Every structure is written in structure tokens, then in C-alpha cells.
Amino acid sequence: MTYDDLLFGVFPYLCIIIAILGSVWRFLSDRFSYSSLSSQFLETRQLFWGSVAWHYGILAVLTIHLVGFLFPETILSWNAEPMRLYVMEATGFTLALFTLGGLIMLIVRRFSSSRIRVVTSKMDIALLLFLLIQVATGVWTAMFYRWGSSWYAMYAVILNAFLLVLIVPFTRLVHFLSVPIKYIWRPHQIVRWNRRSPIIGA
Amino acid sequence: MDVRAQTSMMFHLDKCIGCHTCSVACKNIWTDRKGTEYMWWNNVETKPGTGYPTKWEDQEKYKGGWVPKEETIKLRVADKASTFANIFHQPHLPTIDDYYEPWTYKYSDLFDAPAGDDQPTARPISLITGEHMDINAGPNWDDDLSGSTVYANNDPNYEKLTEAEKQALSELERLVFFYLPRICNHCLNPACVASCPSGALYKRGEDGIVLLDQNVCRAWRFCVSACPYKKTYYNWKTGKSEKCILCFPRVESGQPPACFHSCVGRIRYFGVVLYDADKIESIASAPENELVERQREMILNPFDPAVIAQAEKDGVHFSVIEAAQKSPVYRFVKEWELALPLHPEFRTLPMLFYVPPLLPVLGHVENGVYDVDATDYFTSLDKARIPMRYMASLFTAGNEEQVRGVLEKLLTVRMYKRAEQVDDIDSAQVEAMLKKTGLTAEACEEIFRLTSLPTFEERFVIPPTHQEYTAELTVGDPYAFKAEVGVGGFKGSPERGW
């Protein structure tokens, strides 16, 4: 087995399996720890610029990556025409800078505010580091690899991405598994009965 | 009709002496942990004043509660779509600075300081960062107005007063305030429950206590913004929200909540009321000046055979119906119409009611002397030291007649007893007062008794919780899981392997 086989044939699947099993294990054994661990209560101004830019940016970027990852032909056929390629490249680059800006703001916030330092764990620092590597290498690809969106591959980007998948169950990243979709159709009020039925509406 | 039981509360403000024993009792039991230092599930504030957190009543700032929308109501802070849009940053979330930064003192300096010419001091250090800090806000910073008019002048209820009324309130000889103890209202239409994207908050069906399931909470913090009373709190340390639990472990074992039990002035009453849950939405959507009356309407007469029959059909245990019949809250709120909800215009249908204070209302000063007109006591309400408009802003969504009606009744009871005990008031005048307020002599006697001389059991009528049913009905056979180990999906019997 070559290094390539190991890094791109085994490692990704290993990461995904560990992420799934780890998240399930954490959910069952330590549900209390599932939280977005928001720190807006301690510092709100910097968070606004960091969090909003970061989250909206990464959601858009991640969605486009997923489309490219799952249906590569669609991206390739979109890029077949030069004008559309320029649009794709420009959009991707703008979003990437937006995301990177947000992330840098979040990192600055995490270390500049003494209140925020108190609620910063070692895993938070590790997570921010991996995210920075991921976004920075992404931006690098967009900047220095001509028409990267058509073939998009840089070892570091891919490996670090799966590393991020791997650490999901061991960081606050688990909060993205808790997207409260049920809120859309749930009635506003929730009543839990012991006698009528265990939980109504929850 | 869908009859449900609600553990409900009544605070008699005339009896509150502002000693904070309730707050301390609560703090010692529930919020003495890291991350909860700043929380006061029970707090006592001076009114007029800015309260805790600062200016919590100002919903232009905090966006709590519900507002009318077409035929119904919607959350002021966010509809469902903007909940998702604002999930990464909430524009109206209060921060720790809206409450105060908790602190302790560096006592070790008193012992470890090197010998010198100066007395060592224990400097304040933050309970969040551990760094030195300057104290410039605290949980009762404007207690007794703090010797300043600043806090009273920032009271959101002042908006409704005239300039002359505001001036009058801060004149030194007329300076006047009263205390407002606050806990979670365990509302019938709780904004915190409605706003939680995760569905972590819920109302207990059996007794209406509003609780927060911390295993479901994901720290989106919409409950903190949505509660107009600011009685859900975010624990910055654990990353979970917390709130008053009405001491349910105590209530389930037949004891009143700690803040009730410890109350020195014995201002607190605890009891069950039956209400019609089908009416919640329509009553919460009622026009502002009808809110108090409609909420009272929703509370059902526990002696009415039709109500009893429906209650039993809806699964209210007969022992709870019995407790509702003895409930002091029912008598003050529904029978005598003396107790009012706090800020009903927030439309959460709060189930903590207040008998508004009479004491600061009386005793108008004229030419440096207290003027108590013995010929017509009701006119003293017009010359009240705290304007009726202020009381109405707190308790009746601005309906002055309603507050006036309650205070007239309280005056009548007082005069009735004075005529009886001191005998310096013309009985014809007492008769006239009874007639005007619609109270009977018997009612006056009962109000007096339940206000001034109630026993422990009369103040706190705690319904049985019937944990035996809970055990049977949630797990079926209570012995089914006996001798099992593990949690979550890994339950199993501790049996010898093979």
C-alpha cells in the first residue's frame, strides 16, 4: 500500500467512521456536553463581525464544495463556458475571503478578550487552528491555482478536511449536528405530561 | 374546555419589607455554582427603579414577550424564520454587563500582604476572569434607590408619567418606593418555551411548572431574549440555560419553594388554580385593556360541578381539585379580585400575581404634614404619592380604573377593621365603602384573616404530585427496570456472562 492509498483510501473512511461512532457515543454517554457553547453573553460586539461572516461564509462554501464533491460533472459542465467559470471563480474567492475574515475575527476575539479566554478549551484552540489551515489552504488554491474550481485538489486541503471530520465528536463542532430543524413545524408551546403521554410536541 | 391545573403564586406587596431573605435562600440552594453567580432566580427590586437586569421592562431594548399580529400574537424577538437567520448572533441578547459582573474579594491579601505602614485591603476580583475589577454594578445596585434619583428616573414605567408626577416622586419629603420581589412567573403562554429552537423548555402538564431540559438545550439563548421578565439565564460556564424551577423537588415532597418558605414578611402565597387551556391563545391575543379581566376569566371555579367533572375527565387528580378549592391564590385573584399580574401587556399570561401596595399610596404630604382625610378615605387615592398611572403601568397594562378598584377594596378592608377595633370611624361611612366596592362584611373579615393571620398551611396549599402514577405510567411496571444498569441506549441486566 502506498502513502496515497493510506491517506486517500483509508484515512477518509476511518475519519468518517470515527466521527459517526464518536458523535453517537458522546450523544448517548454525555448528552449534556452537546452545546454550541455560545459566548455571546460575555462578548457580543466582536462576535457579531466574526460569527456572522464565518457561519454564512462557511455554509455557502461548504455547500458548493459538497456539490462539487458529490456531482463533479455539474461543476465541470458549468465551468465549460468561460464567462460562467469567471463567475464561479469570483464568487468562490469572495466567499472564501469573507469566511477567512470572519474566522480571523473569531481567533482574535478568542485571545484578546480576557472573559473569552476563560471559556476557551484546548480543543477550541485546536479546532480554530485546523479551521484556519483549512480556509487558508482553500484561499491559497483559489488564488494561486488557475481555475482551481474545475479540478480542485490540494493534498493539504483534503487531508485537513478529513481531519476536521475526525475531530467533530471531540470538539464543540457537534453543535452542527443539532441544527434545530424541528422548530420549523413544531407548535410554539411544549407540554410534557407524565400521565397523558410521555412527551407532547417535543 | 380543557381543564388543567397550574401551581400559582401570589405576593402581597404591602407586606414586603425588602429584606432579600428569599433571594438568599434561593441563591444558597440553586445558584451558588460557577457560571451562576450572576443569576438571581429570585430577586427583589426597588420600585421605582431600573431593576435587574437593568431596565428589563424596556422591551424596545430587550424585545421580550409577545406582540399582537393580525388576529393572534407573535414573539417580539423573532419569528421562526428570523430565529434561524439570527442563530449565529442574536441582536437583542442581554450580556453579562446588563446584569453585573460577579465578584469576590481577594481575602488572602489580608493575610499574605508584607508588613508595611498601610492596612492591607481585600481588592475585588472578578468571578469570571479572576482579575482585579472595579465594582460599578451589582444585583441590588439601586436598592432603596441608592440615595439617588438616577435609578428611579430611568424606570421604564416613568415614560407614562407627566413631568410634574416625576418631579413629585423625587421630592425629598415625598420620596417614596416599594419593593417588587420577582421569580419566574411560570406563565401559561411562556415566551421562553415558544422561542426555544431546540425545544428544551417545556411546561409540566400536571402542575404547569416551566422547566428547561439541559440535555436538550444547545445554547441558542433565544429563551433569554424572549422572556420579557428576564427570568431565564444563560450559564456562561456550562453553556446551558437555566431558570427558576419553583423548587419542584421541594414541592413534590410537600414543602413550599425555598423563597416562599423563608419569607420573613410572609408575603407569599402558593396554591393551585384550575384553568381552561383551550382559551390560552385567544386570551393572550385580547385587547390590552382587557388582558387582566380575561386572564381572570380563564381561571375556573373549582367548586363548580361542571368544572370538577371536566377536570376529572381531563386527568386532573381529585386531590389536586381539592387543593384548588383551598387555594389562597384563587381567593385573592379570582374571588376577591385583589391580585394582579405583573406587566400583563407582555402577553405571556404570568401566573404569579401581586396585591399592589397600599402603603406608599396613602400619606400624602401637605404643608409638611401627612394629610389623611378622615371624611373620605377614597379621595386619598387621588392624592396618592405614587401616581395611579405608575401602578397601572406595572400591573394592569395602563388600566388605572382596575388598579384603583383593587386599592379601594384594600382601603375598605382596612377601614372596616379600624371601625371594628378602634371605633373611630362612622359605621355609615364603612357601609358606603362596602357598597361602593361590592365587598361584604364577611369578605372583609376573610381578606383580613388571610392577609394578616394566615397559618403556614393556609398560605401554602401544595398539591400532591402523585409520583406513584409517574413511576407507573412512564415505565409501565415499576419493577421492569429493576437491577438494570447503564443509561441511554445501553440498558442491560447485570447478569453473569457466558
Image (cartoon, grey):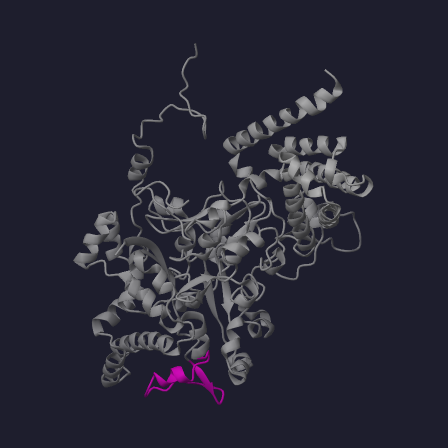
Residue nearer the viewer, B12 or B200: B200
Is B410 rendered above or below residue A118?
below
Name the residue located 43 percent from the left edge and 12 percent from the top edge. B497
Is B142 rendered above or below residue A12?
below
Judge left or right: residue B108 versus residue A24.
Answer: right
Judge left or right: residue A148 versus residue B74.
Answer: right
Task: Spot the residue most to the top.
Answer: B498
Q: Is residue B371 magenta?
A: yes
Quadrant including the C terminus of chain A: top left
Name the residue located 35 percent from the left edge and 25 percent from the top edge. B482
Task: Spot the residue most to the left.
Answer: B305
Principal secondary structure, stretch drawn in magenta = loop
Judge left or right: residue B195 versus residue B6.
Answer: right
Quadrant including the N terminus of chain A: top right
Image x and y of residue A24, in percent: 53, 31
Residue B68 visible to an observer of this rendering:
yes
Q: Which residues are magenta?
A: B363-387
Count of numbered marks:
0
Image x and y of residue A165, in percent: 64, 33
Residue nearer the viewer, A88 or B182: A88
Q: Is residue B308 magenta?
A: no
Residue A109 visible to an observer of this rendering:
no
The quarter of the displayed image where residue B457 is located: bottom left
Task: Spot the residue most to the right.
Answer: A144
Is B494 rendered above or below residue B282?
above
